[in-house]
Image: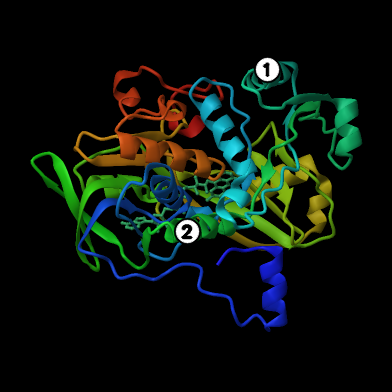
Amino acid sequence: MRFSGWQVLRQGFAGNTGWKPQWRNPEPKPEYDIVIIGGGGHGLSTAYYLAKNHSAGRIAVLEKGWLGGGNVGRNTTIVRSTYARPGNGEFYTHSLRLWRDLAQELNFNVMFSPRGVISLFHSDGQRDAFVRMGNAMRNRGDNAELLDRAELKKRVPYLDYENGRFPIHGGLLQPDAGTARHDAVAWGYARAADQLGVDLIQNCEVTGIDIVNGRVSGVQTRRGAIRARKVGIVVAGRSSQVAAMAGMRLPIESHILQAFVTEGLKPVIDHVISFGMGHFYISQSDKGGLVFGGDLDYYASYAQRGNLPRAEHVMEAGMTLMPMIGRARVLRSWGGIMDMTPDGSPIIDKTSVDGLYLNAGWCYGGFKAVPGSGYGFAHLMARGEPHPTIARFRLDRFRTGVGLMDEEGTGAQHNLH
Ligand SMILES: Cc1cc2nc3c(=O)[nH]c(=O)nc-3n(C[C@H](O)[C@H](O)[C@H](O)COP(=O)(O)OP(=O)(O)OC[C@H]3O[C@@H](n4cnc5c(N)ncnc54)[C@H](O)[C@@H]3O)c2cc1C
């Protein structure tokens, strides 16, 4: 069933009794050509592009819980391509281009809202860094505008510009970046992949990876063994655990990232605002809640909830930036597991096991990457060669030191990016 205005009208007249389930609920088959472990944004988009762009045969996505129950449904939904360095730059630019037509591509309203992302700067040095970033973005064909303080004040009057410690000097605006509805992205890719024949198998945790003579031969799951010619590990915050099933130790530390939402308010924040002096960012959801977050909880953990000192830190940063939010009441907070790489950039690569591929290390920025990552990873899995947009995301950069990426000039140190 395709979604359209006509279909909405028709179903409305029929009392909404004609809607069909959005995807099948198949039993796992004993064998597939390709098995994707993980039904988050990246796993589902990989399966979709494998089927759509590469006609890659019989494909299954194995998800231990329910589709979209991981980080894809826990993030603060910011989509942007404000990256300067080679490797990241072309990748995120490509991903943003895919976002623009994603609703049409999937025939599912992912509610992509290019409302503009503003990164604030608070010193001359920071402004210079943002100028360089803006120029790099424009060279790639992205839009970027430097806003001085007067222009910023016109557009975003409610910030505390006079804060003695962190005065706001201006901002870098990416006008066509913004937010999207996170669940809808998972559902849209799931539905479109299912329509192309991909088996989406929920409640199917992978417990082992079978390797024979250095080649992957399938996986063990809670619903039995499944043979496969190729296997992709796409499990976001569980990458180290699943890779360990193949005897691999990844250059990854897992930390919690928290987020918060207030009660619904009338429209007040038009853009996504990112505070340059602390890790704090905020936008307003279509339902009216102020959605915001900050830095990682700095200890390694697999708990999907955060600690109170970090919550306090985030609130303090918010109050410093826009004191008015002290009037809003926080409705909910939650946490997700972030797989942090030493240089803050992801890994999309083959592994030392033939037929076993890895897509991991998205840190706290992998939602915006969902279309580009699936596109590039599907290309790699189908053809054995990386798509040009993912060519720098190699696993061996952490061993050789060649090609490390770092967006903030802080070096390859876990707690500084
Ligand atoms: C609070 C917070 C805010 C964030 N904000 C942003 C943001 O504004 N912008 C942005 O770009 N990014 C953001 N992110 C990061 C982004 O959400 C993640 O990088 C991205 O969603 C990770 O990829 P995924 O969607 O595939 O992950 P997930 O949805 O976590 O998918 C992985 C799936 O693998 C499954 N799995 C794990 N182990 C197994 C197993 N053994 N067998 C089978 N299945 C398994 C899990 O159940 C899960 O469903 C944020 C994250 C958090 C937590």
- CA gap, disc 1 and disc 2: 37 Å
Q: Which quarter of the figure is the N terminus placed in?
A: bottom right
Q: Nearer the viewer, mark 1 or mark 2?
A: 2
| Mark 1 secondary-structure assignment | helix
Identified at 69% across, 38% down, the residue is 177
Residue that numbered label 2 is attached to: 190
Residue type marked 1: Asn
| Mark 2 secondary-structure assignment | helix
Q: Is residue 121 above or below residue 67?
A: above
Q: x, y percentage for residue 318?
A: 73, 45
Residue that numbered label 1 is attached to: 135
Q: In the depicted view, which residue is nearer to us: 153 or 371?
A: 371
Q: In the depicted view, which residue is nearer to us: 405 or 224?
A: 224
Residue type marked 2: Ala
**Earlier residue among tags 1 and 2:** 1
Identified at 34% across, 70% down, the residue is 26
Q: x, y percentage for residue 291?
A: 69, 53
Most extreme residue toward the left is 213
Quarter of the rendering containing residue 141: top right
